[in-house]
């Protein structure tokens, strides 16, 4: 698999954004889980808007904002599913 600069840029941007989201969620008033889910959803929306703005096609050989939005959406759904479990 060949890697190009665009793919490395998307992976780096994703990692940095996840670190910032986790740090901001730790200081949320409603708790870590709900804050994390909300910020992940907002990140997915930002990635979709950016993908539309840049007119990136959704299916490419390289990673794009659309791929990043899908990952944020899946992480949001996973976080929401874990937040609905009753505490022990």
Image (cartoon, helix red, strand yellow):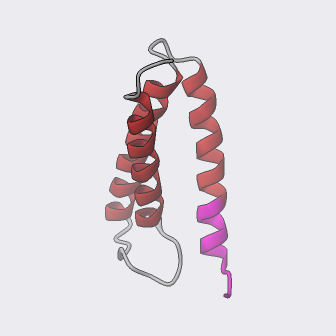
Secondary structure that dominates the magenta span: helix
Give the mark count. Answer: 0
Range of residues picked out in magenta: 1-11
Q: Residue at x 40, y 32 (%)?
A: 38
Query: Does 85 sit above or below residue 60?
Result: above
Query: Does 43 sit above or below residue 26?
Result: below
The part of the image, by quadrant, that contains residue 54 is bottom left
Indicate the position of residue 49 as horizontal and vertical percent values: 33, 54
Q: Residue at x 38, y 79 (%)?
A: 59
Taking the image as shown, residue 3 lies to the left or right of residue 61, namely right
Indicate the position of residue 74 as horizontal and vertical percent values: 42, 52
Taking the image as shown, residue 23 lies to the left or right of residue 42, namely right
Q: Residue at x 44, y 14 (%)?
A: 30
The N terminus sits in image quarter: bottom right
**Furthest residue in direction bottom, as rendered:** 1
**Furthest residue in direction top, as rendered:** 29
The part of the image, by quadrant, that contains residue 26 is top right
Query: Does 54 sit above or below residue 36?
Result: below
The part of the image, by quadrant, that contains residue 34 is top left
The one of 7 and 37 positioned closer to us in this rendering: 37
Is residue 72 a member of the stretch shown in magenta?
Answer: no
The one of 59 and 37 positioned closer to us in this rendering: 37
Q: Residue at x 58, y 63 (%)?
A: 10
């Amino acid at each position: 698999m060949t890697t190009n600069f665009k793919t490395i840029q998307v992976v780096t941007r994703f990692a940095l954004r996840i670190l910032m989201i986790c740090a901001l969620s730790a200081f949320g008033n409603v708790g870590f889980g709900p804050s994390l889910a909300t910020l992940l959803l907002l990140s997915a929306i930002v990635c979709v808007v950016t993908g539309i703005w840049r007119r990136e096609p959704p299916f490419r050989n390289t990673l794009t904002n659309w791929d990043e939005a899908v990952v944020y959406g899946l992480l949001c759904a996973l976080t929401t599913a874990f937040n609905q479990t009753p505490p022990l």
